[in-house]
Amino acid sequence: MGRINLRVPYEEKDEVKKLGAKWDWNMRVWYVPENLSHEIFSKWLLLPNIKAKSFSIARVMTDCWSCNKYTYVYTIFFDEGYHYKNYNEDTEEVYWEHNHYPAMLCHVEYVSADAQLLIEKHTQCYTYDYSKKSKDALCNESLYTLWSQAWRFYNAWGAWRRIQSSNS
């Protein structure tokens, strides 16, 4: 399993450091290294705000903004029927809402361990990294990402892979 990013308030940084978390200077985030169990960091784990029984991986070949070479880029795609956390400003209630439309994810900060393993298996270059252009943390190895530019998938040829996971 890859590393897991944490959401740590500044005043708690020494506590996570003592437990073994590492600081990523480029992404400016604390994370759990691969050799440590994430359970002891449960207080700082990013909470999921999307639930789905399955997801697809969209793959498109495009030119890299940095090196101008063609590279594959990926995004996570949900068919209709997934759930997301919603917030009612009037009542301050947080609740799960059913979405009836397909969607591509952007600005991804956390993926469950099971989903992350499946994504790594099917993309061969998925990694936690940082793209200055998109300001995102989940990228392919050339650092060009469409996590925040998913609309481009509608206008390009690509491959879709259905991935089944009950813990997506």
Image (cartoon, rainbow, N blue to C red):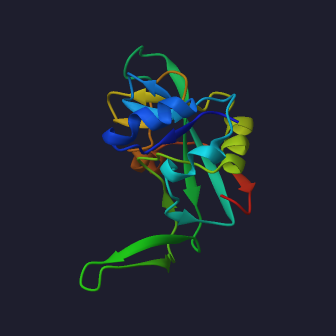
Residue depicted at x 49% and y 63%: 49
Q: Which quadrant holds the N terminus?
A: top right
Image location (x, y in percent) of residue 44: 48, 48
Q: On the picture, is 109 further left or further right than 54?
A: left
Furthest residue toward left: 90
Q: Image quadrant of residue 126?
A: top right
Residue depicted at x 43% and y 48%: 150
Q: Which quadrant holds the C terminus?
A: bottom right
| Residue 28 in view (yes/no) | yes
Q: 83 above or below 25?
A: below
The residue lying toward the viewer, choosing from 118 and 3, is: 3
Q: On the picture, is 97 further left or further right than 32?
A: left
Residue depicted at x 53% and y 64%: 50
Q: Image quadrant of residue 140?
A: top right
Image location (x, y in percent) of residue 73: 53, 34
The residue lying toward the viewer, choosing from 161 and 114, is: 114
The residue lying toward the viewer, choosing from 129 and 13, is: 13
Image location (x, y in percent) of residue 145: 45, 34
Furthest residue toward top: 67
| Residue 139 in view (yes/no) | no
Q: How many marks?
A: 0
The residue lying toward the viewer, choosing from 9 and 130, is: 9
